[in-house]
Amino acid sequence: MSDDNQSVTSESVGKAGLSNWAVSDSGLSVTYDCGGFTGGGQFVAAVAALADRRNHHPDLSLSYPGHVTVVTLSHDVGKLTDRDLGLATAIERLAGEDGYSAVTD
């Protein structure tokens, strides 16, 4: 996709290898198990730094016992865009490097 504001669909999320991420009206989301509360805090800090570098910021939530929920949505256009897909891909890569896995039902 070449247009940064082009809509992202469940199909494009799957094609990007983000099978653990969910698409909803509130955005593109995932929850990671970071192995403990300290690990979760460190992951939140790493995601925040990544988001600052990209100038695209997700909502982050840290809860006991170390679960971090990430929700990204392009608020300026009110929908999911390639910016969200790119950020999610980078976060997924970061989680994998840190050994964190998605919490699945």
Image: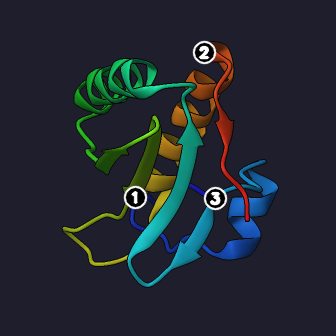
Q: Which mark is residue 19?
A: none
Q: Judge whether residue 80 can be spotted in this image.
A: no
Picture coordinates of residue 8, whole percent (x, y): 56, 70
Q: Amino acid at mark 1?
A: Val
Q: Residue at x 61, y 58 (%)?
A: 1
Picture coordinates of residue 80, whole percent (x, y): 44, 69
Quadrant of res 34: top right
Mark 2: give few (<14), some (14-19) or many (20+) Cα within 10 Å. Answer: few
The residue beneath circle 3 is 21
Q: Judge whether residue 11 can be spotted in this image.
A: yes
Query: Which label's residue is closer to the chain start, 2 or 3?
Result: 3
Quadrant of res 43: top left
Q: Quadrant of the C terminus?
A: bottom right
The residue beneath circle 2 is 98
Query: Which label's residue is closer to the chain start, 2 or 1?
Result: 1
Judging from the image, what secondary structure is the residue with disc 1 in? Answer: strand
Q: Amino acid at mark 2?
A: Asp
Query: Which label's residue is closer to the chain start, 1 or 3?
Result: 3
Q: Amino acid at mark 3?
A: Trp
Mark 3: give few (<14), some (14-19) or many (20+) Cα within 10 Å. Answer: many
Confirm or deny contact between disc 2 and disc 1 (CB under 8 A). Answer: no
Whether 47 is drawn above or below 73: the answer is above
Confirm or deny contact between disc 1 and disc 3 (CB under 8 A). Answer: no
Mark 2 → mark 3, Cα distance in angstroms: 18 Å
Report whether 90 appears left or right of 18: left
Judging from the image, what secondary structure is the residue with disc 3 in? Answer: loop
Q: Nearer the viewer, residue 77 or 70?
A: 70
The residue beneath circle 1 is 71
Whether 6 is drawn above or below 103: the answer is below
Q: Nearer the viewer, residue 104 or 95?
A: 104
Quadrant of res 73: bottom left
